[in-house]
Image: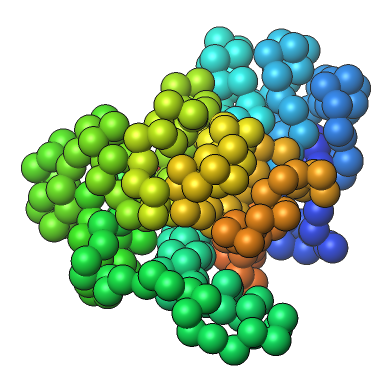
């Protein structure tokens, strides 16, 4: 029996890694490639498929309730905010992600953004290119062991980030309501409540998923609690920060700066005030990327589908 696997959308130049996994699966798979952008397009393509491979196309409750044969939805990446998990669970559809493919890359990128701000590398580079050769442009800079890095989240990526930050001398504190203080202390990290951490941090690095409870977690009220020298680093999801409130806080000097790999709207609007600010670093949602991570992501996302279509449970199942 031929099994239909729909790829809802993709931005890769080729699909050889996915095709190889399906070819070697022992299953008769028809691999359907689409470029869906709307719910209607997904519904039209996905109605009778056995599995869905998803990048960004919306898999809302309406889409999922229209599915007739689907057994698994596998998403490229860690976040599953494109997928209505409750609807999938009600339909008995397995949802799986790839939570471990980019641990090194994302933690390295967060570290790079931290170090660029801590030593003001980007600022100094820009000043020199403007013809200004003067170290005073970066004042003040403080020793790492005089500063605290506050980490929101304590999953795979933030733990790896902390492992890289601590040897540099930074003090580290973390907030995660699902992790005990004892577990954090065991790896040399102090647990703090969210508002206490926000008031304490010189650098605030965000590593929580985007769920209803974390939407605009960093808002006007919390920005006002931060140190005036504080810098926010976000390699998680853009809407965790209220971007309008952030722009105001940066403009008024309520906080010192931001280093963002993600924004509320992607790609970031050319009209965004953040693009006009010297105290903001923005990269184009690239923290996850290395050639090795991209291959691993695509192979594991395809393997999630093969597991389930073979009647097995994928180790990355969320529902």
Q: Is residue 316 above or below residue 230?
A: above
Q: Is residue 40 above or below residue 190?
A: above
Q: Which residue is found at the position 48% from the left and 74% from the top?
A: 138
Q: Which residue is found at the position 31% from the left and 45% from the top?
A: 154
Give the image location of residue 17, x and y in percent: 71, 62
Give the image location of residue 70, x and y in percent: 70, 24
Q: Quadrant of residue 69?
A: top right
Q: Quadrant of residue 68?
A: top right
Q: In the rendered image, which quarter contains the N terminus?
A: top right
Left or right: 229 as drawn, with respect to 312: left
Front position in the image: 278 or 100: 278
Q: Which residue is found at the position 30% from the left and 60% from the top?
A: 162
Residue 278 visible? The answer is yes
Q: Is residue 124 above or below residue 285?
A: below
Give the image location of residue 62, x and y in percent: 74, 12
Front position in the image: 59 or 308: 59
Coloration of the structure image:
rainbow
Give the image location of residue 146, x and y in percent: 22, 66
Q: Is residue 242 above or below residue 7?
A: above
Front position in the image: 314 or 243: 243
Residue 233 visible? The answer is no
**Total number of numbered labels?**
0
Q: Which residue is found at the position 66% from the left and 55% from the top?
A: 277
């Amino acid at each position: 029996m031929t099994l239909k696997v729909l790829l809802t959308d993709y931005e890769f130049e080729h699909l050889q890694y996915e095709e190889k996994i399906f070819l070697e699966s022992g299953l008769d798979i028809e691999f359907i490639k689409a470029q869906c952008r709307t719910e209607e397009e997904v519904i039209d393509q996905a109605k009778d498929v056995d599995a869905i491979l998803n990048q960004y196309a919306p898999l809302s409750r309406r889409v999922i309730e229209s599915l007739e044969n689907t057994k698994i939805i596998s998403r490229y990446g860690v976040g599953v905010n494109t997928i209505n998990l409750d609807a999938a669970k009600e339909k008995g559809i397995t949802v799986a992600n790839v939570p471990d493919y980019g641990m090194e890359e994302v933690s390295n990128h967060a570290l790079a953004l931290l170090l660029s701000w801590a030593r003001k590398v980007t600022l100094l580079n820009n000043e020199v290119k403007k013809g200004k050769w003067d170290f005073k442009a970066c004042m003040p800079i403080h020793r790492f062991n005089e500063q605290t890095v506050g980490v929101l989240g304590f999953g795979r990526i933030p733990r790896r980030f902390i492992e890289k930050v601590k040897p540099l001398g930074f003090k580290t504190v973390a907030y995660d309501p699902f992790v005990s203080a004892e577990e954090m202390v065991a790896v040399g990290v102090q647990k703090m409540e969210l508002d206490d951490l926000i008031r304490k941090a010189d650098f605030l690095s965000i590593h929580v998923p985007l769920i209803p409870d974390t939407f605009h977690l960093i808002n006007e009220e919390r920005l006002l609690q931060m140190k005036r020298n504080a810098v926010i680093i976000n390699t998680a999801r853009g809407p965790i920060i209220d971007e309008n409130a952030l722009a105001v806080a940066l403009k008024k000097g309520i906080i010192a700066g931001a280093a963002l790999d993600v924004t509320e709207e992607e790609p970031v609007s050319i009209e965004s005030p953040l693009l006009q600010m010297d105290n903001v670093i923005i990269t184009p949602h690239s923290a996850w990327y290395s050639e090795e991570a991209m291959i691993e992501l695509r192979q594991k996302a395809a393997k999630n589908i093969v597991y389930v279509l073979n009647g097995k449970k994928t180790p990355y199942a969320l529902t």
